[in-house]
Amino acid sequence: MLTREDRDHVIALRRELHQCPELGFQEHETARRVAEELRAAGLDVREGIAGTGVVGVLRGGEGVASARTMLIRADMDALPVQEADGRPYGSRNAGRMHACGHDGHTAMALTAARVLAGGRNALPGNVVFAFQPAEETTGGAEPMIRAGILNEPKVDAAIGIHLANTLRVGQVAAQSGPITAACDGFVLTIHGKGGHAARPHLSVDPIAVAFLVGPALHLLMTREKSPAQPAVLTVGAIHGGTAGNIIADTVELRGTLRTYDPDLRRHLKQRVQETVEGIAASMRARAEIEWDESYPSTVNDPAVVALVQRAAAEVVGQDQLVEHEASLGGDDMAYFCAAVPGCYMRIGSANPAQGLDAPHHSPRFDFDEDALPIGAEILVRATRKFLGGEG
């Protein structure tokens, strides 16, 4: 379905985008380039949504005003990572890098727009292409949805795509149910009473309390949920004290709680708060916890997944459809999948024989660009199937 010209275009576009990585809500040049490509394909374009978001609307042939509409989502932002040297299309922006494949996601969605627009007269429906900012940080999906991008035309289903160096190039994973987690950060402050290390009985030592809180939180994760329910709590930072002979006034713990099930999410957050407050009170200290709620869990719809699997099998073969372990990382594709039935699929992009298997967010991250035409063609085929009445 993709021509040689399309294949060359998606790779060239990805390399162009890779050289100008921009952080969340700063994707001005990327957004300009996206809008340019969409207009060249003949789509109606809206810019400046949620800051730097771009939407392109492709309307099908005559008589489809009330037909189905598919949304294809791509994220555009890069990471604050200094790229390792050695590639001719490397980042030109110091300290910034497309280290998670968002340049590839954008290039695949733009190529799908180009291909679908080429046959728009025979397209039995509409396609909304959403290029969102800031997936890696505070999230651009939710404010784009609040801006009404699902309403005109009314979106019936959504597909997102993510390159995966955890899968070999040619493999595709699309599965029902939760595939990313709800991610809740927390800052726990333990207030004590400072003093001299030689007279601890005259103080309330918040670091001693922290020594009790840490193991209690990890124990809580084994006794407050079913072993069959995935969840993880990590304390990643502890800050407190200035010298070895001084008892501090406060100590701060920063961490994250990750869950799939919304009821378990609420329960564990409540129990974390009760646990830290109870331990602190028992030691004459006081604990305050502030939650930074991030994205909810991304949950794939079975019908849309089945449609994507059929499209993927036509492109890579049934034997290349694989299961992928659900991630306890987060992604704001979750908001699209909560608003309409959706599927977030993974496109294998690793090629160990060529040294293209570094993990995401690594300074050495890169991928086999043969994954790009695969992803773009699956987007095209899945969209046509959905608009034609499948799924």
Image (cartoon, rainbow, N blue to C red):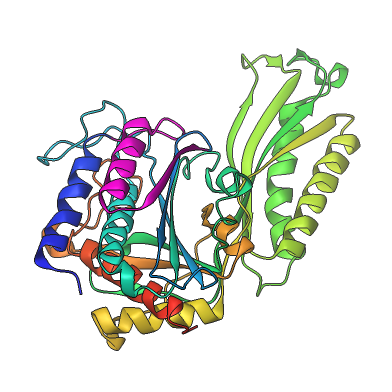
Q: Quadrant of residue 177?
A: bottom right
Of 25 and 42, nearer the camera is 42
Residue 227 placement (x, y as % from top left) = 67, 72
Task: Return the x and y of residue 30 as percentages of the image width and height.
Answer: 32, 37
Residue at the outermost front position:
62
Is 3 drawn above or below residue 17 in the view shown? below
Read off the magenta span: 21-49
Q: Quadrant of the N terminus?
A: bottom left
Residue 137 drawn in magenta: no
Left or right: 76 as drawn, with respect to 157: left
* Residue 350 visible in the snapshot: no
Q: Is residue 75 above or below residue 52?
A: below
Report whether 85 appears left or right of 382.
Answer: left
x, y percent for residue 116: 30, 66
Counting the numbered discs, the total is 0
Nearest the viewer among 228 and 365 is 365
Q: Was residue 28 drawn as part of the magenta stretch in this picture?
A: yes
Residue drawn at (22%, 56%), measured in percent from left and top? 367
Placement of 368 over or under 188, stated as above or below: below
Residue at image point 11% right, 61% down: 5
Closer to the camera in the image, 208 or 94: 94
Extreme bottom residue here?
318
Q: Is residue 339 left or right of residue 223?
A: left
Q: Position of residue 166 (x, y in %)?
A: 33, 64
User: Could you tell me which residue is drawn at 55 percent across and 71 percent down?
Assistant: 66
